[in-house]
Amino acid sequence: MEIFWYIPTHGDGRYLGTTVGSRHATPFYLRQIAEAVDGLGFAGALLPTGRSCEDAWVIAGSLASVTQRMKFLVAVRPGLVSPTVSARMAVSLDRVSGGRCLVNVVTGGDPIELAGEGLHVDHDTRYRITDEFLTIFKPLIEGKEVNFEGSHLKVRNARILIDKEQKPTVPLYFGGSSDAGIDVAARHVDYYLTWGEPPGEVAEKIARFRRHAAQFGRRVRFGIRLHIIVRETEEAAWNAASDLIRYVNDDAIQLAQQTFARMDSEGQRRMVRLHRGSREELEISPNLWAGIGLVRGGAGTALVGSPEKLEQRIREYQEIGIDTFVLSGYPGLEEAYYVAELLLPRLRQNRPVVEALAAG
């Protein structure tokens, strides 16, 4: 089991739906979180992408020099950057960080945002572009020369002149719930990610994915993206969850749901379906809370509870095939400490927290 954290390059704070208690993604704050991730026993951290975020590659590069162990799961968007340039960026980050680069392939699900970035194609076409992108990207990372001509991308004699004795290994992570997304992942990636749906639904998705990947003779590992609120008692954890949305009103929920409705992401649709824009019955599965998805896109669920209960919930996901957990919390710095102190020792993940703290 690997536990990753999250670098909030936009939108962190004590509460959702308000500027009260908000925190800007300053170099100082991001460094604080990275150093916490590095020292508390997390395997690494996800860096997001999007027009509201600081650039993931620049931030990862800046944090590599102030950390020693953590890996950087950095987002790349096919269709916005060429596969050759992206491969060169990945190789460079992997070298300067001492082999700590991981790549999260993000096709994108908001047509309006993508149009603003210059990508004017429909959902399935974006995934066809992603397929061609990875057909070029993967062999380049391995030091091979690539000649490829597809419907959207074309390269001739493409190559990265890397040192053969220091050939990087850059695993690929990918999330996509649609048929087109699953097909791309089954063909190319090393880790298939899902958002935090109830265990039964995750199990169905994993089974579906495995059947498709078997057609290509491939076996892929699985991860899940979740928020988390862990406290010493159940009561304290659920109070913290309620406090997180204390400023979220009906107008904020309605506005957010209108934004989500324009998206053509199957994963986002599945997130919205869990709560349907209503505050009622937000605990959709034991200790799985959909309150964040009322006003935040993407990962909209959180595990909420005591260390004992959350260990049970995480073990349930592990039993159905999940071995990578990409977690986050509000605020990112404080919640990282809660998770490291209360939960990581129970999961026996990486080094004991006391040892990690002593090592600095």
Image (cartoon, rainbow, N blue to C red):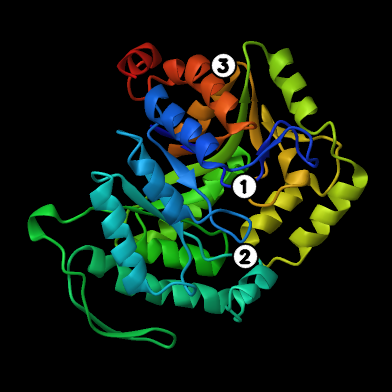
Q: Is residue 311 at all visible to an observer of this figure?
A: no
Which part of the image, by quadrant, shows the C terminus? top left
Residue sitting at the far right: 250
Disc 1 packing (10 Å; few <14; some 14–19; many ≥20): some
Q: Residue at x 86, y 48 (%)?
A: 252
What is the number of callouts on the image? 3
Between residue 46 and residue 323, name the one nearer to us.
Answer: 46
**Which residue type carries mark 3?**
Pro
Q: Tell me if residue 90 comes above or below residue 130 in the rendering.
A: above
Q: Closer to the camera: disc 3 or disc 2?
A: 2
Q: Earlier in the sequence, mark 3 or mark 2?
A: 2
The reply to whether dot 2 and dot 1 touch (C-beta < 8 Å) is no
Residue on which disc 3 sits: 307
Mark pair 3, 2: CA separation: 34 Å
User: Percent position (x, y) of residue 306?
Assistant: 62, 16
Residue on which disc 1 sits: 10
Disc 2 packing (10 Å; few <14; some 14–19; many ≥20): many
Q: Quadrant of residue 123?
A: bottom right
Q: Residue at x 47, y 44 (%)?
A: 46
Q: Is residue 171 at all visible to an observer of this figure?
A: yes
Which part of the image, by quadrant, shows the N terminus? top left
Q: Closer to the camera: disc 2 or disc 1?
A: 1
User: Percent position (x, y) of residue 95?
Assistant: 23, 51
Residue on which disc 2 sits: 109
